Every structure is written in C-alpha cells, then in structure tokens.
Image: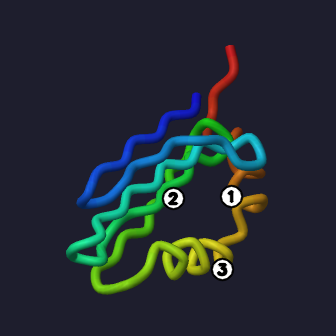
Amino acid sequence: VTTESEDASGYEKTYKVDGNLVNEKWHKDSRSGEYSVIVADRFVVKLDGSNVEIDDLKSALEDIDLDKLAALKDEGVKRG
C-alpha cells in the first residue's frame, strides 16, 4: 500500500520500509506531525511532536529497536 497526498498546509504519506507499514503526516504551519510504523503486523510505534521537523521524529524512531519488537510478535499468542 502506497499513498501520498499534499496540499498547501502539509502532506500525508503511507508506504512500506523493511516490510513495515509507515504513515507520515506533517502540518507545515504548526510544524507538527506524526510518524508511525506498524511492526510485524502486530505493534504500532507512533511518534508525534509539535514545533519540530519531520526528520526529528524519524531520527527519534532510530532509537527504538524495531527488530527486537518484531521478535515479540508471537509472545502471548495461543495456537490452536
């Protein structure tokens, strides 16, 4: 799934990175937005901020070990 829309006030994009679905929203006027990733089709990691740049949110996500989170995808799942 890949989508992208943009207008004078900002943009929204949805795309895949390393098999994870990413959603990026940015409001130019308020310099605010959110950046979220669905990890291993189970977990959502969402960062949002005001008075920042979208690259700041993306950089903050680099501090989270998404591979370790993905490794937990089967924890607590009951198999029939």
Amino acid type, mark 2? Val
Q: Please tell me which residue is depicted at 38% across the width and 84% down the height of the picture.
A: 52
Residue that badge 3 annotates? 63
Helix, strand or loop for disc 3? loop
Q: Residues within 10 Å of mark 2 (few under 14, many from 20)?
A: some
Q: Please tell me which residue is depicted at 24% across the width and 60% down the height of the picture.
A: 9
Question: Which quadrant of the figure has residue 79?
Answer: top right
Q: Please tell me which residue is depicted at 67% across the width and 75% down the height of the picture.
A: 62
Q: CA distance from mark 1 to mark 3?
A: 12 Å
Nearest the viewer among 66 and 77 is 66
**Number of the label disc, if any, that sits on residue 45:** 2
Disc 2 or 1, which lies upstream in sequence? 2
Q: CA distance from mark 2 to mark 1?
A: 10 Å
**Number of the label disc, if any, that sits on residue 46:** none
Where is the C terminus found, in terms of image quarters?
A: top right
Q: Is residue 7 above or below residue 2?
A: below
